[in-house]
Image: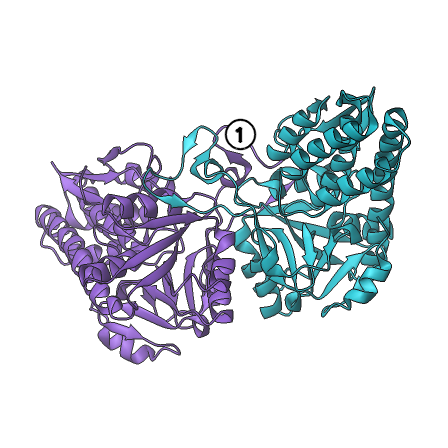
Chain colours: A cyan, B purple
Amino acid sequence: VRDETLWWEGDHLFLIDQTVLPARYETVECTTVERLAQAIRRLEVRGAPALGVAGAYGIALATRTCRNTHFPEFLAELQSQADLLRATRPTAVNLSWGIDRVMARVSRAGGVEEAREIALEEARLIAREDEETCRAIGAVGASLLPDPCTVLTHCNAGALACTRWGTALGVVRSAIAEGKEIQVIACETRPLLQGARLTAWELIRDGISVTVVPDSAAASLMRRNEIDVVLVGADRITEDALFNKIGTYSHAVTARYHEVPFYTAAPLSTFDPHRKEGEVTIEERGEEELRQCGERQIVPDGAAVFNPAFDATPLSLVTGIITERGVFFPPLEMARILSAQPPL
Amino acid sequence: VRDETLWWEGDHLFLIDQTVLPARYETVECTTVERLAQAIRRLEVRGAPALGVAGAYGIALATRTCRNTHFPEFLAELQSQADLLRATRPTAVNLSWGIDRVMARVSRAGGVEEAREIALEEARLIAREDEETCRAIGAVGASLLPDPCTVLTHCNAGALACTRWGTALGVVRSAIAEGKEIQVIACETRPLLQGARLTAWELIRDGISVTVVPDSAAASLMRRNEIDVVLVGADRITEDALFNKIGTYSHAVTARYHEVPFYTAAPLSTFDPHRKEGEVTIEERGEEELRQCGERQIVPDGAAVFNPAFDATPLSLVTGIITERGVFFPPLEMARILSAQPPL
């Protein structure tokens, strides 16, 4: 069992198949952008930072499968592969960010061979930076957690959402590394149960105490003073809103009501400071995620279902945004964030 | 397919098996209190008013299976069957209410044969009253709904939670019968999905428009002004709190935050006016409800789970309590409710 979520080996991209955890640990080998796109759509790999790394490696893959030898045509072919990859999930901004960062370097290459080298070099750098960023986020966020502390989290913003360490769960890991006593309440996160399946799996693997609860139990735990901090990841942060897994907004409202601090932990690559909430598409996923539970039919024929993958939380409900360059407190000084953002 | 949830036939109690809906419609025949207790524990029958009727019929069943012919000993045997039945679920008060109401009449009987007649007569009366009560609740509540109106509901407070018509969904049915245009958003209600499985099934059967959503999507629907009213049932209403399916409290907090009216609809038999929140036990159900999804393992070994069946919502968050004798507005004038309550 590797402790990375995705890695490059033998000129192919490998990733942990997150759809079969925790029952089975299996890996997926992606030899083409098409297979990677499928892995992203199926959520075999998911999580905003991991999607950034996957997008970057995807371009490295594409440089190996594009057939054109004439560089301008090669670049055009690469661009269409990039577009295919980018279209798989509309809400998380990191996917585009990883793709664009590699594409920007590749487009300045001297030819096809150099493009292949540069693409892989840049993708590897992004993967390495992702881990460093998570550790920096962890160090920044750890100081915000009291000792002892019970953290409520939603979905999976852990090692499995990144290459290693995690964003929200990276903060938990860093606080524990500093000697703090931290336990985690993981909301199971309907419909795909990433909290129950993935967050619990990776925390248990690291010996961190975790309790899985239905999403709907979070508010009553807050009322009973059993939650010290809510800590989630982010799929995109615009000037005015945090986009994250459906249910995040509910936790933000109930945290505000109970005066529980609500933090999001995310790399600066998650910021999309030039956009406002209304400009972002919220992905709706397939009805079968709600209609079926395994083989079992849950929703009767004739009933409609609504299955948004994300919701938007106004930043006014966010206590602080934990990044690799410090904590930002809304309302955001976007100029400051932009100046902190690493250049493409 | 019967339109009753439970009924007496051939000296036995029959009920719709609510664990296999919506995939299959099956009935359970209870010939003993033990089998009925199992049905209640397994949630083959559930819902506070239905549990009241089931408790009543349970005593009728017991009068038929108790072997003692000497009346005082017969009554003692009956009492131990009543205790067994009452212990199946601690939170919903109606179960005890139904049991106690039949026991009170039976204990004044002249002998075993008369006790058998009286028990069945009283249980049948309770079942008939349950439907009348639901229709009265519906008439009272219908006037509170705007036209058109989108109602968000949680779990199942419908015909399947009563003998017929329903409490919260009875209000929806009565409003539609008055010509109002009502659509329902049914929260799926983890972990046992009574909203997706039961609420959607019975509304579709009646041609009422229903959309199933994850529990965690309710708050963001409120933020988008897509919910006009939240309307839920009740398992117990004390002087200070509404006990209902886990997740109810979260909806109450987010409804208050978005200034959406939050109503509960319940017969007076659901009131427990002499108790306060802290005196009521919240049932915790089996871990397997969260650990498994069908055959599939969801929560990894080593992770804890917390699976409370109910939560408590302070009545200060409840806009109004819709009963068969009108709407009560918290803070409750308990004296008025007590005087409205039908005598045991």
The chain ID associated with circle 1 is B
> Which residue corresponds to the image point at 28% horizontal and 73% vertical from the top-left?
B327
Left or right: where B189 falls relative to B19: right
In the image, residue A294 sits, relative to residue B153, either above or below, namely above
Which image quarter: residue B264? bottom left
Q: Position of residue B289 (x, y in %)?
A: 49, 40
- Judging depth in this view, the residue of A39 and B92 nearest the camera is A39
Which image quarter: residue A127? top right
The residue indicated by pointer 1 is B296
In the image, residue B93 sits, relative to residue A165, either above or below, namely below
Which image quarter: residue A3? top right
Q: Position of residue A206 (x, y in %)?
A: 77, 39
Q: Position of residue A263 (x, y in %)?
A: 71, 60
Q: Position of residue A46 (x, y in %)?
A: 67, 38
- Judging depth in this view, the residue of A199 and A53 nearest the camera is A53
User: Label 1 sits on what residue type?
Assistant: Arg
- Figure disc tally: 1
- Judging depth in this view, the residue of B248 and B231 nearest the camera is B231
In the image, residue A300 sits, relative to residue A28, either above or below, namely below
In the image, residue B67 sits, relative to residue B127, either above or below, namely above
Quick check: can you spot residue B318? yes
> Which residue corresponds to the image point at 56% horizontal and 46% vertical from the top-left?
A283
